[in-house]
Amino acid sequence: METISGLQSLEERRETKTLTKRQKYKAIPNSVLNRRLKDTNKGRLKRNSFYKKYPIKESIRIYTDGSATDAVRNGGGGVYATLPDGTTLKRSFACGMRYTNYKAETEATKEALNMVNNKISKTSKVVILSDASSVLQT
């Protein structure tokens, strides 16, 4: 069809549009996206630093995740935690019909904290590892 109409293919048009937007954001010096394009690792904790800051034998590590069908319904979550003594705690659960990705991620974080609440001392280092930074920032 592209040969008959003389138009670019949809894939080529999308790629061109993406490249054009990238150039636009690069041209705006104080743009948030411009800063993200320059430093993709900023704000990320390097693995080596993480292991030094939160040693396995001294910290409680909590891994959480939540998701929903089409991001807006039938949410559910999961929690996996490791304690300094080597004990692991696991739980997966359904949240409900009207739970979005965000709500499911939030419930997973709440559930994780409830699971380890009685295992935390005042000197415990607790780290929550989640792919939902929006939940951790609220």
Image (cartoon, grey):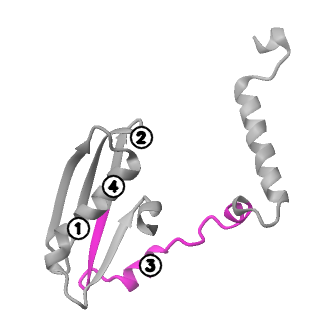
Compare marks 3 and 1 and give the one earlier in the sequence: 3
Residue holding disc 2: 71
Which is more toward the observer, 48 or 117?
Answer: 117
**Which residues lie in the magenta part?**
34-63
Q: Secondary structure at mark 4?
A: strand
Q: Splitting the image into 4 quarters, where does residue 33 fall?
A: bottom right
What amino acid is found at the position of numbered circle 3 in the picture? Asn
Are the residues tagged 2 and 3 within 8 Å (C-beta)?
no
* Spatial CA span between label 2 and label 1: 25 Å
Residue 47 is situated, as x and y percent measured from the top left of the image, at 44, 74
Mark 4 residue crowding within 10 angstroms, few (<14) / some (14–19) / many (20+)? many
Tell which tag, 3 or 1, sits nearer the viewer: 1
Compare marks 2 and 4 and give the one earlier in the sequence: 4
Judged from this view, the residue extending furthest toward the bottom is: 123
What amino acid is found at the position of numbered circle 2 in the picture? Ala
Tell which tag, 2 or 4, sits nearer the viewer: 2
* Spatial CA span between label 1 and label 4: 12 Å
Residue holding disc 4: 65
Compare marks 4 and 3 and give the one earlier in the sequence: 3
Residue 77 is situated, as x and y percent measured from the top left of the image, at 27, 51
Report the residue at 27% width, 63% height from top.
110
Q: Secondary structure at mark 1?
A: strand
What amino acid is found at the position of numbered circle 1 in the picture? Ala
